[in-house]
Amino acid sequence: MNTANINGKWALVTGASRGIGRQVSLALADRGCNVILHSRDSSHTEALAKEITDKGVEVMQVSAELAKPEAVEAMVQTLLVSGRSIDIVYNNAAIMTPYRSEWTVVPGDDLRLSFEVNVTALMRICHAFLPGMIERGWGRIINVTSGIADQPELIAYAVSKAAVDKFVMDTAPKLAGTGVMMNLLDPGWLRTDLGGPNAPGAVESVIPGALVPCLLDDGTSGKLYRAQDYVDSVI
Ligand SMILES: NC(=O)c1ccc[n+]([C@@H]2O[C@H](COP(=O)([O-])OP(=O)(O)OC[C@H]3O[C@@H](n4cnc5c(N)ncnc54)[C@H](OP(=O)(O)O)[C@@H]3O)[C@@H](O)[C@H]2O)c1
């Protein structure tokens, strides 16, 4: 596999405080990448920031409630004027509204919240950093999706992820030849706060697969990478 050198680049990881985002942040730092850790409150990433700093890379912490467009905008503006060029955006943060056994009536708030956090904020973050990446001729955007299927009890979450897939598929052709790649990652069903204790996979198994769409240098966008396909791989 032809891999890019991400040493010294800057990556924004949303939802970095725990679960998959934490694993991705640590793995990026292991490759020499500087990391911007996002969560809802910077205190959630304090310990991780220390751990990553000890790896010898630079760290910045940002906070934003992704359900609030004004908070997303404030975070984006903070980063745009920070003087750092964001080379990698890992849109990982998401919510899953509760399992609804009475699934024939999906609460409107489930849909609104799922779309605000999982889709609208994600798209805003992509659109904020794409122009700079295109101008510099290099960028990686990884939007985390899900393999969820046949669970109408979680339909608000499922349709929000389908919207993320559509966003990536329709944006991808426009990125051809720019040096910027936008792809999807399905982490697999993993034991995290969102995945729950019955998930078959350990959260650590998301690495190295989650890094593949960051490191690949083949210029293609619009692809779905499944982290679990790379469990025994050396990347
Ligand atoms: N785990 C699985 O089995 C699985 C399967 C398929 C796809 N995924 C996807 O993988 C990604 C990460 O999932 P995970 O299991 O690692 O989740 P998680 O353990 O629940 O962590 C969620 C992260 O997102 C942040 N977050 C949650 N709600 C937010 C909000 N309203 N605004 C801003 N940040 C918010 C949290 O920050 P705070 O510390 O501030 O709460 C936390 O860092 C998600 O996109 C999820 O859909 C997971």
Image (cartoon, grey):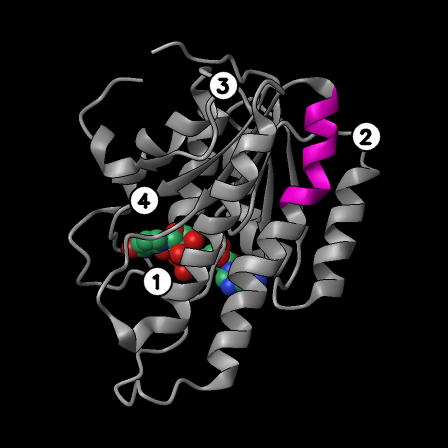
Quarter in which the C terminus is drawn: top left
Residue kind at label 1, given as amino acid type: Asp
Q: Which mark is residue 219?
A: 3
Confirm if mark 1 falls within 8 A of ligand 1: yes
Q: Please tell me whether residue 155 is drawn above or below residue 80 in the rendered image.
A: below
Of residue 35 and residue 1, the one placed in the foreground of this image is 1
Q: Which label's residue is closer to the chain start, 4 or 3? A: 4
Of residue 129 and residue 179, the one placed in the foreground of this image is 179
Contact flag, marks 3 and 1 (Cβ < 8 Å): no
Give the residue pinned by disc 2. 83
Q: CA distance from mark 1 to mark 4?
A: 14 Å
Q: Secondary structure at mark 2?
A: loop
Of residue 51 and residue 111, the one placed in the foreground of this image is 111
Q: Which label's residue is closer to the chain start, 2 or 4? A: 2
Q: Which label's residue is closer to the chain start, 1 or 4? A: 4
Give the x, y percent position of residue 210: 37, 34
Identify the residue shown where x is 67% and y is 51%: 124
Contact flag, marks 1 and 4 (Cβ < 8 Å): no
Marks 4, 3: nearer the viewer: 3
Quarter in which the N terminus is drawn: top left
Residue extent of the magenta highlight: 126-135
Marks 1, 4: nearer the viewer: 4
Marks 3, 1: nearer the viewer: 3
Give the x, y percent position of residue 59: 63, 34
Give the residue pinned by disc 4. 187
Residue kind at label 4, given as amino acid type: Pro
Dot 1 crowding, Cα within 10 Å, few <14, some 14–19, many 20+: few
Identify the residue shown where x is 62% and y is 57%: 121
Q: Which mark is residue 193?
A: 1
Dot 2 crowding, Cα within 10 Å, few <14, some 14–19, many 20+: few
